[in-house]
């Protein structure tokens, strides 16, 4: 990956420690909170295993404090990862604080475990060369990846952005008015049961091993046809 002005690209993975009733709550209403927490952990395992190797990776976590078991599980997928707690305020304020600094910063969540590596590489290259902000939009109006280039102030994320809404990406574009903003080809994350079915239908064998194992064990992946 192309470096930023300080010599490297940072990858920020924004997560909650999976626990029933605290993660994937919309999906949990459909599949049950325990299953949703197990799926969130599978998503994170795959995200770290696929995206973190070779990149300085920061796990940005919501309260409460992470358990030793969870830290060990993250490090099993990304041995060199570090952990930073989210600060106070709304999601925008917390993201702004986590992404403060220079260089190229790429932020992903744990909801798009099969995000193509090509999107990550293209975002980093654009940010190092010509773009100030790069995103991979999602169909629901948010985004699966957000990248900030060298010198771009993350504090703009603390502005008037309607998070977890159909307006999130449009509001983010507006927040960075005056900057060069690039949207790559969309890639959807998983919030609802329909999203989960779509993910299962596009999974390629072996790419997201933890997610695939969860889907098979819970009956969301047909073992004969490879479809939900």
Image (tube, rainbow, N blue to C red):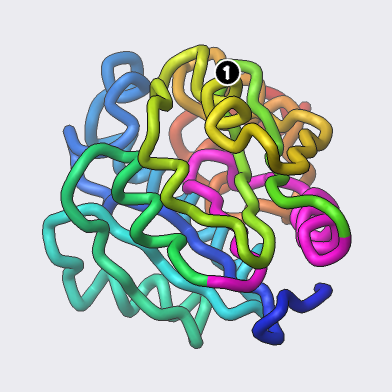
> From the viewer's perspective, is residue 99 above or below residue 168?
below
Residue 181 seen from this side: yes
- Say left or right for 39 vs 2: left
The part of the chain drawn in magenta is 102-129
Nearer to us in this view, 111 or 214: 111
Along the line of sight, the residue nearer the viewer: 49 or 99: 99
Rendering quarter of residue 204: top right
Measured as percent of width and height from the top left, residue 74 is found at 41, 71
Label 1 CA crowd tier, 10 Å (few <14, some 14–19, many 20+): some
Q: Going 21% across and 57% down the picture, which residue do you hit?
A: 87
Q: Mark 1: which secondary structure?
A: loop
- The residue at 73%/55% (across/down) is 206
Residue 128: image location, x then y, percent: 80, 66
Q: Give the vertical position of 193 relative to 185 (above or below).
A: above
Residue occupying the far left of the picture: 64
Residue 124: horizontal and vertical position, in percent? 77, 61
Quadrant of the frame with the C terminus: top right
Q: Quadrant of residue 46?
A: bottom right
Q: Is residue 137 above or below residue 126?
A: above
Residue 106 part of the magenta-drawn span: yes
Asked whether residue 192 is drawn in magenta, I would say no
- 201 sits to left or right of 63: right
Is residue 54 in view?
A: no
Please state if 185 lies on the left or on the right of 187 as rendered: right
From the image, tell me which residue sits under label 1. 141
């Amino acid at each position: 990956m192309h470096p930023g002005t300080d010599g490297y690209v940072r990858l920020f993975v924004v997560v909650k420690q999976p626990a029933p009733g605290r993660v994937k709550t919309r999906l949990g209403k459909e599949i049950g909170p325990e299953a949703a927490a197990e799926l969130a952990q599978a998503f994170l395992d795959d995200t770290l295993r696929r995206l973190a190797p070779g990149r300085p990776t920061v796990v940005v976590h919501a309260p409460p404090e992470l358990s030793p078991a969870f830290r060990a599980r993250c490090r099993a997928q990304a041995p060199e990862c570090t952990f930073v707690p989210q600060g106070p305020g709304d999601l925008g304020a917390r993201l702004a604080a986590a992404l403060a600094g220079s260089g190229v910063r790429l932020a992903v969540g744990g909801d798009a475990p099969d995000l193509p590596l090509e999107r990550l590489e293209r975002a980093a290259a654009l940010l190092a060369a010509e773009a100030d902000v790069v995103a991979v939009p999602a169909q629901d109006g948010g985004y699966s990846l957000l990248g900030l280039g060298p010198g771009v102030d993350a504090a703009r994320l603390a502005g008037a952005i309607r998070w977890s809404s159909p307006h999130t990406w449009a509001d983010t574009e507006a927040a960075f008015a005056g900057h060069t903003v690039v949207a790559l080809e969309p890639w959807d994350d998983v919030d609802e049961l329909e999203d989960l079915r779509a993910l299962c239908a596009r999974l390629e064998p072996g790419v997201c091993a933890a997610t695939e194992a969860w889907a098979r064990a819970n009956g969301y992946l047909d073992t004969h046809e490879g479809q939900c």
